[in-house]
Amino acid sequence: MHHIKSRHGQEIKETTAFPRLPGPRVVTHGHKGGEDPLRRRKVLTGIAASAAAAISPTPGSGSPSTEETLLGELLVARIRDAMLGLGETIATPSAWDPDTDFSRALADFDACRYSGLAVRLPRLIRAGHATTTGGVVGSDLPTKSYLLATRMLIKLDEQQLGWMAADRARQFAAARGDALGIAESARQLAVLARKAGWHTEALTIALSAADDPDLRGAGRPGAAERGLLIQSAAYTLARRGDREGMRELTDEATAIARELGGAIMLREHGGGFGALTVQLHRISAENHAGDPMAALDAARTVSLKALPSVERRSRCLSDVAAALDRLGRRQECVRTLLSAERHAPQETRARPAVRALVSSLLVSGPTSTELRGLAQRSGVLV
């Protein structure tokens, strides 16, 4: 049995080795009897047309905000098909370089450009599959692509696909002996376990991964990943309503960040790790632990301009809005959501958590022109 009394005074079960699963094999068969090839082509053509409209809407062809609310659905559908080896492959430009394309996909994620991710991320997943032959993983592209896909699927509340993507990332990372990739996939699995309500399991996954000797031997990047895992465990305790435990683990993450200095490390892992990102995490954690005033106090120490990406700024604003809503400060909540929309329109209008907050505001009290406008642009009020 593994104890973490130095962290929170409770026992966490020791994890065992993950089972090794066979790699996916997708075989393309000919058309079966009764299937209409013409109908199939029409369906695929319709999907492609919808994708083109959402990614590059023609002026006057429709409401951009309406199209943005559908970008999340489009992105999920394309990731799903890429993971399953279905549908048509997205064309690659001449002289295409997967590492460059991944960097651009990560920039799309940081900037909350769902339209760009809807093209690049599925293409990268398919390219990653192509690097694997005979059980040998030829590069870190599959791990990186599946980790980014998992983050996106969690954000869009697609937990079933998220489990699949995180587990594949873990398998690809294990095949290459990639300690950081294994740890980050464990962190994503812990997030998914938490969202499923499996709090003890989420703590076990995150804290056991943080204590893994391979991660402890990975130098400064390994320390940063440990901080991310401990931070994830703290958030799980917040969700369980354990305010004291959440604060203890968050303080531990803060101590790791201070030891690493002021720079934000591992930018490709959940927006990175550093003292500033720990404080950002504290906003949401305090709110979910039942202390929205402490959440706002934490927010006052965070400079939006200092956050490393639009995605992190959007997350900060949406977390502050949630705390304001809990305190019944409706007008400030709406103003904060409108600010989030200005920073990241595609994310604000498509992310389920934000849309749920907007929907709740519509039915819980008096509305305003600004709130109704945001609801319409988010597809909540038709």
Image: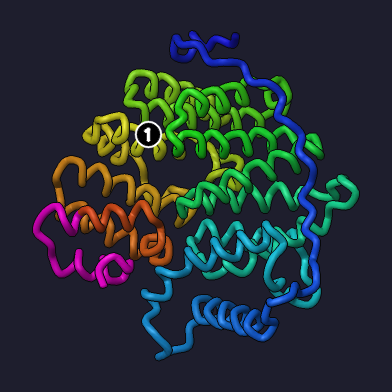
Q: Is residue 145 visible?
A: yes
User: Which image quadrant for residue 36?
Assistant: bottom right
In the rendered image, which residue does mark 1 sit on?
282
| Residue 131 figure quarter | bottom right
Which quadrant does the C terminus fall into?
bottom left
Give the color scheme: rainbow, by chain, secondary structure or one colour. Answer: rainbow
Residue type at tag 1: Arg
Q: Residue furthest left?
A: 366
Is 379 situated above or below 235? below
Total numbered labels: 1
- Give 159 or 365, whichever is nearer the viewer: 159
Q: Is residue 48 left or right of residue 380?
A: right
> What is the x, y in percent for residue 238?
36, 29
Q: Is residue 35 above or below residue 262?
A: below
Relative to 304, say whether 28 is above or below: below
Farthest residue to the bottom: give it.
60
**At 36% from the left edge and 33% from the top edge, which residue is drawn?**
285
Residue nearest the observer in this picture, 33 or 101: 33
Q: Position of residue 196 (x, y in %)?
A: 46, 37
Q: Please tell me whether residue 378 belongs to the stretch shown in magenta.
A: yes
Q: Residue at x 40, y 91 (%)?
A: 60
Could you tell whether 217 is left or right of 238 in the image?
A: right
Callout 1 secondary element: helix
Left or right of 39 in this view: 359: left
The residue shown at (51%, 29%) is 202
Tell me where the magenta segment starts and ends, as one range. 361-382
Density class for disc 1 (Cα within 10 Å; few <14, some 14-19, many ≥20) is many
> In this picture, is 181 found above or below 65?
above
Q: Position of residue 275 (x, y in %)?
A: 47, 34
Q: Does the image show residue 374? A: no
